[in-house]
Image: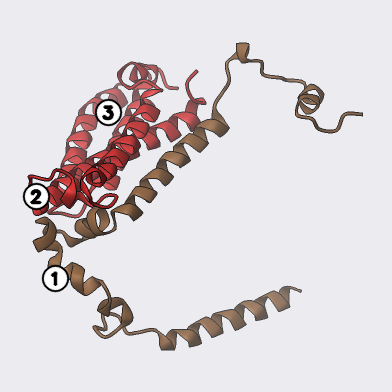
Chain colours: A brown, B red
Amino acid sequence: MRLAGVVLIALVAGFLMWATRDLPLRGDPQSPASTHVSVYYIENALVDSKTPNMVTAVLADYRGFDTFGEAVVVVAAALSCLLILLRRRDDQGVVDDPDERRRIAGGADP
Amino acid sequence: MTSRYDSVFLDVVSRGVVPLIQIFALYVVTHGHYDPGGGFQGGVMLAASIILLRVAQGEESYERFPRAAGLYLAAFGALAFCLLGFMPQLFGGNFLEYGYAIPPMEAVELRYWGIFFAEVFIGFLVWGALVAIYDALATGGFD
């Protein structure tokens, strides 16, 4: 079983290495990633928004909606942490007895 | 939590380092147009300064930065960014298309300031969210 796992990993790794032959070279100006919208961004970021740092222009202006989604994800993570880890006050009825808690939650009730 | 008098060195060094971290964080947030940086990085640095206060000063830090403040800051940042996005829609633009936000102004200027305020609001948001996460993990929220 252990050997089968090693063989499987080797096969997948070999397949992925073989597949990298089809990737474009790094910095290739003719690759699809370099010929679509990035040319427009590089040429027009300074003209459109007076921003010398084109990374910021792409992040906050051209792709602002994506950044908005990222920001909302951060807030959602903070809210989830609070919801999971919030220590309740004693007067809000924390139930210590596991059987009682299970009965309230509608679990197994004989 | 450590008490205030556990270590004099920790107390003195944290008092000196926290303002420097915060000033550099403000620089990173507001200088995103010209240098690497922006709201996410600067917000993380602001959160790191508050967490250093929490670790070094203990209970005293809750008087300066209350436990609920983190969540309020994060909510304010998200709401303000959302309203900033809706502003252009009042005048015929798309969501977050800053060039339409205030009609008499030039579109280039508006996009510049739109990027600036977006970064600032993201800074508030990340700052508050990370402090809220730290407080939830360390002390269990508001109580």
Secondary structure at numbered mark 2: helix
The amino acid pointed to by label 1 is Glu
B138 sits left or right of B77 in the view: right
The amino acid pointed to by label 3 is Ser
Check if mark 1 and mark 2 are on a common chain: no
Q: Chain of mark 2?
A: B
Density class for disc 1 (Cα within 10 Å; few <14, some 14-19, many ≥20) is few
Secondary structure at numbered mark 1: helix
The residue sitting at the right extreme is A110
Between marks 3 and 2, how big is the CA–CA gap? Answer: 40 Å
Secondary structure at numbered mark 3: helix
Where is residue A78 shown, x and y percent of the image? 45, 37
The amino acid pointed to by label 2 is Glu
A109 sits left or right of A45 in the view: right
Please name the residue that numbered disc 1 is placed on: A43
Where is residue B54 shown, x and y percent of the image? 37, 26
Viewer can see residue B122: no
Please name the residue that numbered disc 3 is placed on: B14
- Foreground residue among B37 and B17: B37
User: Which image quarter: residue B1?
Assistant: top left
Please name the residue that numbered disc 2 is placed on: B109
Q: Chain of mark 1?
A: A
Where is residue B81 shown, x and y percent of the image? 29, 41
Viewer can see residue B89: yes
Check if mark 1 and mark 3 are on a common chain: no
Check if mark 3 and mark 2 are on a common chain: yes
